[in-house]
Amino acid sequence: MASRSLLPLGLVDLTWLRASTELGLPHTARSARPLCLHVIRRKMHQAATAPTLYGPWDAFPVTDATRASIKERRSKLGALAVRNVEGNDTAGELSRRVEALVNVAASEAESAAIIPEFSEDDLLAFYENILALPTDQQESPVPVEASQQEKDWDTIKALSQRLFADAEPSAEPEASDFTKHLIQRQALDADSSVIDDLSSSLPRDAAAMPPHHRVLSFLRLVTPKVEAARNALKPAFGAEVQAPVPVAIMADAEWQSLVRSFLETNEPELAEETLVLMKRSGIVPYEESVNDIMASYARAGDIESTETFMQKFLTANPTDRQRHLHIKAYLRSVPAGTIPTGALEVLHHYENQSLPAPMMTYTNLITSLFSVDSSLAHAQAWDLFAHMRYVAHPDPDALLYTLMIRACASPGLGGVEPERALDLFTEMTVDHGLAPTAGAYSAVILACARSGTKEYINEAFRLAKEMLDAHRDASGRPAFPPEGRTFVALLEGAKRIGDLARVRWILAELVRGSQPGVESGQGTTDAVITEEVMMHVFHAYAAYRPPFRPSLAPLVSGEPTLAEAEHTATPNGEVTAQPSSPEAEVQTQHAESSLPIEASPDASFKHLPPQSRGEVLHEASALFSRIVEDSHTSAYANAPSRHAADGLPSAFQAVQLTPRLLNAYLSVHYAHAALDAAHALFRTLFAEHGVEPNARSYVEALERCAIARRGRERDAALAFADEVWEGWVRLENAARLPGARSVNARMVERAHAAMIRTLALTNQLDRALTHVREFATRYPPSAVREPSVLPPMRSSRTALLGAHPLVRFTSNTEVPDDTVPPLLGFAELEILHHRLVAARRRDAVGYVKYVCKAYEGALRMRRDATMRMATEAQTQEEQ
């Protein structure tokens, strides 16, 4: 053992294991026992021979503190308890556990019996109640005004019958003899002088008067007698009578019903007289009645009556409602399309008195400013919005947010602003937590769609999908079903990028939704196809560029086509390709579209968009024919419809034939048809449907002539332009008459520039120069120099008090000037200038340069004068 202990322990165990394996011992528990015994003996031997590491027990001193800590640990641990195995009742413990499980099962069964069971219909009703649409999105209840009006008239009739004792005798129980005796004695002793006096003082035709007029006549007679009686009692009571004692001639509800009855018959003067009689009777007029009369004056725009009424009946500062009505009277007093300067002054006057108007007042003023066709008014609306958030209402409501988002879609201040629209929509829904409305969604979709870029147009369609899918009830119905303005906004975006596939899909959804009993793919919709919808549809057809070009696939026939004519044969018989001229290319493109197209009302639309210009014209003509037929059917109820056999309703019966609809239909032919066909259509379209062409009709026709290609098309363009110009001259001369509606200055510029360009392209240089001289005579450059006077509300001075906004979104230099008269620049006369240079007409070239520089210098002088006037006005205000 001594020699074995010299080996490493692991080597000893490994040697023993290998030796047992070589001897063939089986690996069982019995064969492993000698190895275990060997290991135990070895470890015991090592323990005996191990050196002593610690000293004896007495070497460690034990103090009192050590004994106390040991005793404390033992007391905490406690003594070990000996289990009494013999005393354990295993069967009893098991029975107790089984009994506990039975009790738990019984209690669960009882609780399950208490909980009611829900059917599928109950669960569906439960989720429908949770996911129900908001109250304002559901059908509006019956207005309360109708029932209130009936109650008022019933009250007035009962009051008239009570005062004049003309009610029909009602069925009452028969009185006793004693009661009859008392009634007879009261009639004999009563002094009927007052009743006789009142009866004799009433008008002779009082019986024929309406009930509310009869009651007012009675009050006119009774009130002076009440005042006389009160004055007679004053000497008796002396100074103790501080206030008149109210005399209850009528109940409070009867007074209010009488006032409302006069307002319903549009007699606010008599309603005001009723309040005067209330004051004379010692009754303080009710605030509700005062507001009703002020609302009647405000709706009529009667400023004088409104302010007189306020001075007569208001003893304290006006309430929010009364301030709103006061400003509304000023707002209604100005004609439509005019900046409400007086209303803005009254608004700022209340702000200076620390009495800001309610938010609805600011909303009405901003709406009125946006309705004015002026960049100045639009800038003032944005400034008023910023001013309101600074001095009165920092958090706008959903209605005002929607109004400002829709204003971002207006190009009044230099272009559409989709970024600002998205920022306002995010501020409304995320920052302030306001629930989005259908109007807000439609407004932001319109702003993105009118931007004209694919990025924002795709964002508009994404918002439309969010509008339909993000808010649905338990049945899957959207909270905001698609509306007409939503479809119009999407059409605005699709037509600007020429996406005819989306336009056709939207039109199909509108047609499907107009059929009774058929639900659209996006839910039930109340949208109606109007002339605005079809105008956008025709614009999309005009902007669409078909993928197929006839020049790429020439027809093979006995006669050479235009594409084959481009190849000429040499004397050696070789065929060489000649470069195609622009004239030949245009003729090739319009070879198919120049053929006469008969619009078949029964034409079916393919799934794919039109692949050629001819198919584009065919679809547009078929749509227009259907519109004409449906509008004719709706105008004449007995007119037969050729579409009655297909079982479809007249989807286009709400479409009216207006100038802008006909202009949109003509734009399709301007873009895809030959100029001769467009000329023939323009000559007959307006006269056939009884519609008078407007300024845009002539301008678009002239601009189509101004881009005519070389060859026969330019000869046709000159004849077309001369015919159109005659109509334009009549329209322009009529607009210059006193009291007539003027034509926009930019439209005048476009018309004259297009005519000058057409004359220059057709080598009519003398006529073009004459046209330029006539334009300079009618609209001289000197008229451009005079600047427009800025109103005081556009003052740029920073002041805490004043009739102008305290903070602004726009400066005066950022607001376009809409009052600039028509002018001509070098861009409009460039073609004429080049042709004159080529013809070596130096004098004519000098005159054209003079005209361009004259208008340019006048425009610069106008700008400098405007800035000088703004600086002088600011200096005067500071002084």
Image (cartoon, grey):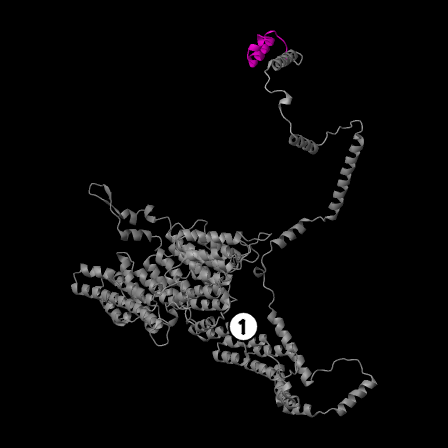
Quadrant of the image containing the N terminus:
top right
x and y, in percent, of residue 737 in the image: 34, 75
Q: In this view, does 758 lie to the left or right of 505?
A: left
Magenta residue span: 1-27
Q: For residue 325: magenta?
A: no
Query: Closest to the observer: 43 or 811?
Result: 43
x and y, in percent, of residue 560 in the image: 29, 48
Measuring 44% from the left and 49% from the top, which residue is drawn there? 608
Q: For residue 15: magenta?
A: yes
Q: In this view, does 130 lie above or below 656?
A: above
Query: Closest to the observer: 824 or 280?
Result: 280
Which residue is tagged 1?
A: 319
Measuring 51% from the left and 58% from the top, which residue is drawn there? 438
Q: In this view, does 860 lie to the left or right of 531?
A: left
Q: In this view, does 557 lie above or below 199?
A: above
Furthest-right residue in this view? 177
Q: Is residue 752 above or below residue 87?
A: below
Quadrant of the image containing the C terminus:
bottom left
SS for callout 1? loop
Question: Residue 761 lies in what quarter of the image?
Answer: bottom left
Q: Is residue 144 above or below residue 180?
A: above
Q: Magenta stretch: dominant SS?
A: helix
Q: Does the image show residue 619?
A: no
Give neighbour class at mark 1: few <14, some 14-19, many 20+ (Cα, 10 Å).
Answer: some
Query: Closest to the observer: 520 or 147?
Result: 147
Q: Does the image show residue 231?
A: yes
Question: Residue 749 lies in what quarter of the image?
Answer: bottom left
Q: In this view, does 119 lie to the left or right of 820?
A: right
x and y, in percent, of residue 138 in the image: 58, 60
x and y, in percent, of residue 72 in the image: 68, 33
Residue type pointed to by label 1: Thr
Question: Residue 771 lies in what quarter of the image?
Answer: bottom left
